[in-house]
Image (cartoon, helix red, strand yellow):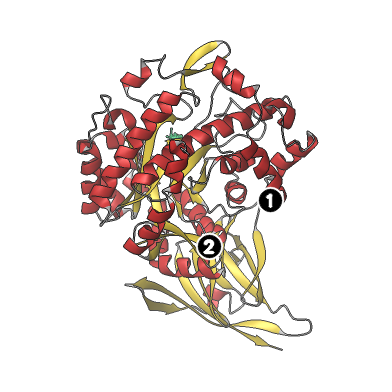
Amino acid sequence: MRFPSFVVALLSLTLPLYAAEASGQPHLEKRGSATQLVVDGKPFLVLGAELHNSSSSSLDYMAPIWPKLAALPLNTVLTPLSWELVEPEEGKFDFTLLDGLLKQAREQHLKVVFLWLASWKNGMSSYPPVWVKRDTGRFPRVVTNGNEVEILSTLGKATLEADSKAFTAVMRHIKEVDASDHTVLMMQVENEVGVLGDTRDHSAIANRAFDSTVPSELTRYLVSNRQSLYPELRDLWEQNGAKTSGTWEQVFGASPRADEIFMAWNYARYVHAVAAAGKAAYNIPMYVNTWLAGEDTTPGDYPSGGPQPRVVDIWRAAGSVIDVYTPDIYQPNFAEWCRRYNRAGNPLFIPETNGGATGGANAFYAFGERAAIGVSPFGIDSWNDGENDLGKSYRILEQLSPLVLEHQAKGDIRGFVLDKSRPSVTFVLNGFQVQISLDEIFGFHTEQGFGLLMATGANEFLSAGKGFRVSFNPRTNGSERVGIASVDEGSFKDGQWVAGRRLNGDETDQGKYWRFDQRQINIEKASVYRFQ
Ligand code: DGJ
């Protein structure tokens, strides 16, 4: 019996994974209550940022940028790598750029995540080599509103084969040059995929597929994962009778949602297949990123078929090669998007988001509250040195990384971002009810605060951030209360705690609160006690 090449590639992934763990190769690992990126046998927190799309196409352009990125300090740079520059002529691969980028990154002790800009980037197909672009017969395109557009169809067999071949060559080369260094941590496969300008591909081949029966792998997945399906998807399927067979419109109803689900299935099949081909050559974690839909938008206003939260299940039904589904969060409701992606076993990685002070604050939230693998604000190379608020956060997070990773796994760390619309949060940690509120003292009210808090021992806590204050309650009935025994600021040098001032008096509002004022990001340890 002959298996399709897609299946063979999938099967071949199992063995290399064990090899990966043994060799220290980057891989994802469930450690306690978190899924973490493990590199050289140790968990790794990605303090990252993404370059502008075209920066990494020139080594000369990049040369002065790398040292600035290292000084920020970043530990990982999300670096575009395009199909057109890797395979300018069919079958002739050029890895000069890839090798040069790795050399430059290593000189600055930086890690890299390559973004494979190939069949799609922001929905469109501007990154394939010109020999693909001009051959619209061999590499068919999407039809929207009656016209072929510059978007490669997911149903082009030759396109999938060509993209997979190129990606395999890339991964084989990375294995050759990086299997002992592990500079390359992960691969992003394609970029913000999905059809723009219409709810789905209306080419003849796509119309035929749309009028055919929904693949049984998908309906089986819906049945066996019914309880954990994203609620919006489950509701849609159930409202249409929870059918286990039928055409896409019969199973999901005649609406733009059915079109989006159809496109999600087809992009997912394609992207899993490209990723499987690459992983068969070198198996490191791979993810896809998402242009997020606005709340009241129609598929096609945003790329239809990309892994929006409501169709991540469709992607998962289509294959298990992609390890992480990730959001590009430029919208203000950062925490809500984190929640939508960090569910049903999907770890949180944020490949694109805002930088500056907002990005720096959100990083604390993502690592503390959502056990994120990493965060990566976009367009880092155009920021002025003076706008280094992200760096201020990263300098603290860099010191705390080992502790953050340890407590992510233990599940005893929380993160928060506070402002006037959400001035306080309350949760239980280490046996205490903890309230975190915007800081205020002597009538002065702070308007923004952020931080993370972890339980470091019985009655012991470590926290970092600014603009908030912490109070503890005992969680027992009766007259028991909690006092603050001590608060010390400090820092970590080579992993060792170096204590600074003992904070008392105004700094703790005369012992009433553990305060982090709004002037700078601090690291502090507190010890508390119970009394009547
Ligand atoms: C999201 C894309 O993924 C990036 O490549 C870039 O185009 C940014 N948008 C620009 O904001």
Nearer-the-camera pick, 247 or 191: 247
Nearer-the-camera pick, 444 or 414: 414
Q: Residue furthest front?
A: 1
Image coords of residue 103 (percent x, y): 21, 48
Split into quadrants, the picture shows ligand 1 in the one at top left
At 34% across and 57% down in the image, what residue appears? Answer: 25
Q: Which residue is mark 2?
A: 34
Horizontal relation, residue 154 to residue 226: left or right: left
Q: Quadrant of the rendered structure where residue 365 is?
A: bottom right
Three-letter amino acid code of the residue under disc 2: Ala
Image coords of residue 311 (percent x, y): 62, 38
Image coords of residue 177 (percent x, y): 23, 49
Q: Say whether disc 1 or disc 2 marks the residue closer to the N-terminus.
A: 2
Q: Is residue 321 in view from this perspective?
A: yes
Which quadrant: the C terminus?
bottom right
Three-letter amino acid code of the residue under disc 1: Ser
Q: Residue 228 bears which disc, if any?
A: 1
Q: Is residue 350 above or below residue 369?
A: above
Disc 1 on helix, strand or loop?
Answer: helix
